[in-house]
Amino acid sequence: MKDLKKTSIFISLILRHKPETIGISLDQHGWANVDELINGINKTDDYHIDMGILEEIVRTDNKQRYSFNEDKTKIRANQGHSVNVDVELKEAEPPEQLFHGTGEKFVASIRKEGLIPKSRLYVHLSKDKETAEKVGARHGKPHIFFVHSGKMFRAGYKFYLSENGVWLTKSVPPEFLGER
Ligand code: HQG
């Protein structure tokens, strides 16, 4: 049986990318039915959960990746989706500067075309350099871009702040990127 962290990663896969892995679907706002999620997960050989375990995962997740609805009959990921759902993100005015950590192998392409969401719905931005370093390290040797988010916002670009504090935007053109 997998531990909570591995189970949480599997839940991320289901709620952000591939609900069909366990034969469920998400509604237009990204919600999965909690009973269906638990039953679907328990049909796999590798994972076993119940409501108590799911509540513990949601409560203790280090990035607060998931939210329940009020009566805990539904659950969704707060951000990070590749499937096209509308999680009712709140538009917000970003700080003057945000950060994006990436891998060195992507730097040349990003300098040329700016940040694009690739497989996800949005480009993910961090509010501090330390977080960006961690995000970048997932892709090899990390490289940090500074994002002139204040300038972008004043130029009419929209920013969203997810329930778990991640800044999101559709793309960042190269003229709004800095490296020092
Ligand atoms: C890169 C994790 C070439 C981009 C993290 C990134 C985050 C380009 C990679 C969240 C590019 C996509 C998202 C361009 C962007 N040319 N490469 N023009 N534009 N890229 O994993 O931001 O733990 O989809 O720099 O903490 O790394 O899963 O995005 O390196 O918040 O909750 O394309 O995922 O959170 O990689 O990470 P990803 P990300 P969780």
Image (spheres, rainbow, N blue to C red):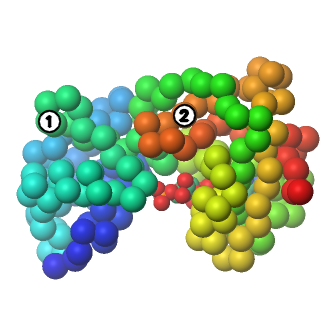
What x and y, as percent, mark residue 176? 86, 40
1 or 2: mark nearer the eye: 2
Q: At label 1, which amino acid type do we have?
A: Thr
SS state under label 2: strand
- Residue 22 lies, with reference to residue 155, above or below; the image says below
Q: Which mark is residue 150?
A: none
- In the picture, measured across the screen, residue 71 lies left or right of residue 167, that is left
Identify the image quadrant of the N terminus: bottom left
Q: Which residue is mark 1?
A: 73
SS state under label 1: loop
What x and y, as percent, mark residue 19? 30, 51
Does any portion of residue 146 appear in the rendered image?
yes
Query: What residue sits 80% from the left and 50% below the top?
Result: 146
Q: Which residue is mark 2?
A: 161
- In the picture, measured across the screen, residue 29 lies left or right of residue 128, that is left
Q: Nearer the viewer, residue 133 or 169?
A: 133
- Residue 122 lies, with reference to residue 119, above or below; the image says above
- In the picture, measured across the screen, residue 159 lies left or right of residue 56, that is right
Query: What residue sits 54% from the left and 44% below the top?
Result: 166
Q: At label 2, which amino acid type do we have?
A: Leu
Q: Quadrant of residue 43?
A: bottom left
Identify the image quadrant of the C terminus: bottom right
Do callouts 1 and 2 mark residues in contact (Cβ within 8 Å)? no
Query: What residue sits 31% from the left and 69% below the top?
Result: 5
Could you tell me how far apart the alpha carbons at marks 1 and 2 are, in whole angstroms? 24 Å
